[in-house]
Image (cartoon, rainbow, N blue to C red):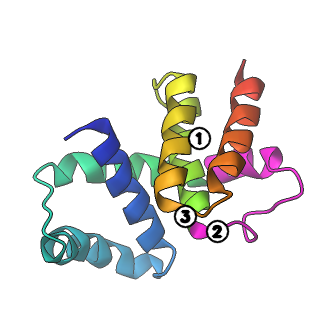
């Protein structure tokens, strides 16, 4: 599995998480791999790797969200789209808590926003990620 495919699975799982209670998440994640992906003609033999990474991100969500809140000028977490929010969460995790080079994290965030977000998503994601990276330097 490529890093891009891994990121796409992670964004989808984070997105699914937005719609379910905490006690439903494990079941929803199982359904994602066992039913949703096969119904789309896809598979993910590295589901354990995806879930390990997903759990690392979820464990850091309070810290990630705190970082995002401070870097989103005139925005709050409830005002941004769920797609953009979860792209930012993933990429902020990579840029701040992981060993992914900052430029790579930003580039991947922008590309994912172009693919999954709205017309203005890529610019918004790029701006927030640039502020996060500048703060880390």
Alpha carbon distance from label 2 to label 3 = 5 Å
Residue sitting at 56 percent across and 43 percent down?
Answer: 110
Residue with the mark numbered 1: 92
Nearer to us: label 1 or label 3: 3
Q: Is residue 68 magenta?
A: yes
81 left or right of 37?
Answer: right
Q: Nearer the viewer, residue 24 or 6?
A: 6
In the structure shown, which secondary structural element does the residue marked by tag 2 occupy? loop
Question: Quick check: 77 above or below 54?
Answer: below
**Residue 103, quarter of picture:** top right
Q: Position of residue 8 (x, y in %)?
A: 36, 53
Residue 40 picture location, percent across and down? 19, 72
Q: Is residue 63 left or right of residue 56?
A: right
Q: Position of residue 50 (x, y in %)?
A: 27, 50
* Residue picked out by circle 2: 81
**Considering the numbered disc 1 on the image, is that residue within a helix, a strand or a loop?**
helix
Classify 44 as above or below 78: above
Whole-percent x, y for residue 57 in the image: 46, 48
Q: Residues within 10 Å of mark 3 (few under 14, many from 20)?
A: some
Viewer-side label of 1, 2: 2
Quadrant of the snapshot with the C terminus: top right
**Which residue: 46% across, 55% down?**
115
> Do the numbered discs 2 and 3 sit on residues whose CB atoms are within 8 Å?
yes
The residues bearing labels 1 and 3 have C-alpha atoms spaced at a distance of: 14 Å
**Region rendered in magenta:** 62-82
- List the residue tagged with mark 3: 83
């Amino acid at each position: 599995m490529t890093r891009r495919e891994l990121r796409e699975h992670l964004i989808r799982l984070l997105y699914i998480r937005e719609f379910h209670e905490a006690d439903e998440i494990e079941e929803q994640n199982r359904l994602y791999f066992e039913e949703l992906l096969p119904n789309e003609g896809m598979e993910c033999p590295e589901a354990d790797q995806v879930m390990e990474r997903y759990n690392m991100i979820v464990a850091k969500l309070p810290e990630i969200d705190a970082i995002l809140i401070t870097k989103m000028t005139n925005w709050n977490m409830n005002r941004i789209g769920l797609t953009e929010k979860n792209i930012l969460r993933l990429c902020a995790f990579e840029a701040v808590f992981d060993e992914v080079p900052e430029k790579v994290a930003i580039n991947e965030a922008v590309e994912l926003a172009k693919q999954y977000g709205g017309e203005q998503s890529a610019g918004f994601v790029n701006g927030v990620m640039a502020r996060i990276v500048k703060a880390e330097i």
